[in-house]
Amino acid sequence: MIQRKRKQTEYRKRLSMLKSGLPRIVVRKTRNVVIGQIIEYRETGDITTGSAYGSDLKKYGWEFSLKNIPAAYLTGFLLAKKSGAKEAILDKGSRTLKKDSFVYYLLKGAKDGGMNVHADELPISEERLYGSHISSYYDKRTGNQFSSTNEKVKNIKEEINRVMERIKQDGK
């Protein structure tokens, strides 16, 4: 607990992850994007073998936020396709995950992309995954909120499926 407060590595947890021999899936969120990475242990130091950034979604036609739940899901899907990793274990760091955490949605995307993710149960909501919470907010908008996406906000599920198809076609 003290290590978490000081933001120090909990070496017992890290050692147990490393003993599994599986690459780790690391999820981070910046002010602007969600990031997913596949990290493998080497004696000389950890190396990143695959990564996907929320900003990568733009080239597949994603026009919405790059750090919301649907973007996290798509980033996980893209990570699975780009990295080619078959399985990974979640490395959540010192973070305590709460219900509806974007981390779960990224893992769900990676699973749907074909990666076997070793993690506890993924407590996700299909409604939030497909952006119904965003769509319902659209009717309450003020000023020029959603001005760049307009009516597309009402059909986020269709946009998610369209982007997923483009990712599948591209392959990487």
Image (tube, rainbow, N blue to C red):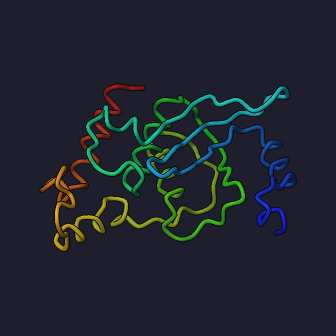
Q: Nearer the viewer, residue 63 or 108?
A: 63
Look at the image and tell me in which quarter the N terminus lies: bottom right
Residue 4 image position (x, y, % from top left) = 77, 63
The count of marks equals 0
Relative placement, left or right, of 137 versus 170 is: left
Residue at image x 44%, y 49%? 32
Q: Nearer the viewer, residue 108 or 48?
A: 48
Q: Nearer the viewer, residue 168 or 10?
A: 10
Look at the image and tell me in which quarter the C terminus lies: top left
Residue 2 image position (x, y, % from top left) = 84, 68
Q: Residue furthest left?
A: 151
Relative placement, left or right, of 76 versus 16 is: left
Residue 132 sits above or below residue 75 on the image? below
Which quadrant holds residue 116?
top right
Residue at image x 20%, y 57%? 146
Relative placement, left or right, of 125 versus 161 is: right
Q: Residue furthest bottom?
A: 140
Residue 63 image position (x, y, % from top left) = 26, 45
Residue at image x 30%, y 69%? 133
Residue 135 image position (x, y, % from top left) = 23, 65
Residue at image x 53%, y 71%? 99
Which quadrant holds residue 127?
bottom left
